Image (tube, grey):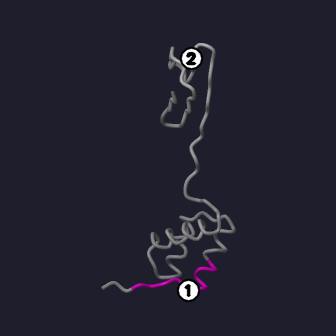
Amino acid sequence: MSNLKFYSEKEIELMTKAIKNNEKLTVASVRFSKEFNRSANSVYVKLLSLAGRMGINKSKKPAKVVTQQSEKGIALKSGFVFDFKPQRAEMHSNHVRLFF
């Protein structure tokens, strides 16, 4: 049976201050892991959880969506031209979505 170890109010307060000061979560997790005698991964997950509760999303940035249309079809990246007309096209960083 594993021994559960909860975070104290003082530990949570220190982590909250680090998030509010825009400290990188990976750096903060390594620092706090030494102070709290816990693994860096578990502290990092707790920091992500606290940041999410505070409304600060530090984990991922949304993909950039670019929509382009032209007269004779949809012009996407160089070399990609289609003769049919979808209703909408979304260009993401790693793929293209066409809606008919």
Instruction: Name which quarter of the figure residue 27 lies in.
Output: bottom right
Segment colored magenta = 4-14
What residue lies at 56% left-to-right and 17% top-to-bottom?
73
Image side of residue 52 versus residue 97, left or right: right
Residue type pointed to by label 1: Ser
Q: Is residue 55 above or below residue 9?
A: above
Nearest to the observer: residue 32 or residue 81 = 81
Which quadrant is the N terminus positioned in?
bottom left
Judge whether 92 appears above or below 20 on screen.
above
Q: Amino acid at mark 2?
A: Gly
Q: Residues within 10 Å of mark 1 (few under 14, many from 20)?
A: few
Q: Residue at x 58, y 71 (%)?
A: 50
Question: Residue 75: horizontal and vertical position, in percent?
Answer: 57, 20
Magenta region includes residue 50: no
Label number found at residue 20: none
> Looking at the rendering, which quadrant does residue 52 occupy?
bottom right
The count of marks equals 2
Residue assigned mark 1:
8
Q: Is residue 12 magenta?
A: yes
Element marked by disc 1:
loop
**42 relative to 80, above or below:** below
Residue at x 53%, y 64% (from the top left corner): 26
Label 1 – label 2 distance at C-alpha: 60 Å
Mark 1 and mark 2 lie on one chain; the one further toward the N terminus is 1
Question: Does residue 14 appear to the left or right of 7 in the view shown?
Answer: right
Disc 2 crowd rating (10 Å Cα; few below 14, some 14-19, many 20+) is: some
Q: In front: 28, or 91?
A: 91
Residue 72 location, x and y as percent? 59, 13
Q: What kind of element bears circle 2?
A: loop
Residue 73, numbered circle: 2
Horizontal and vertical percent for residue 44? 51, 68
| Camera-nearest label, 1 or 2 | 2
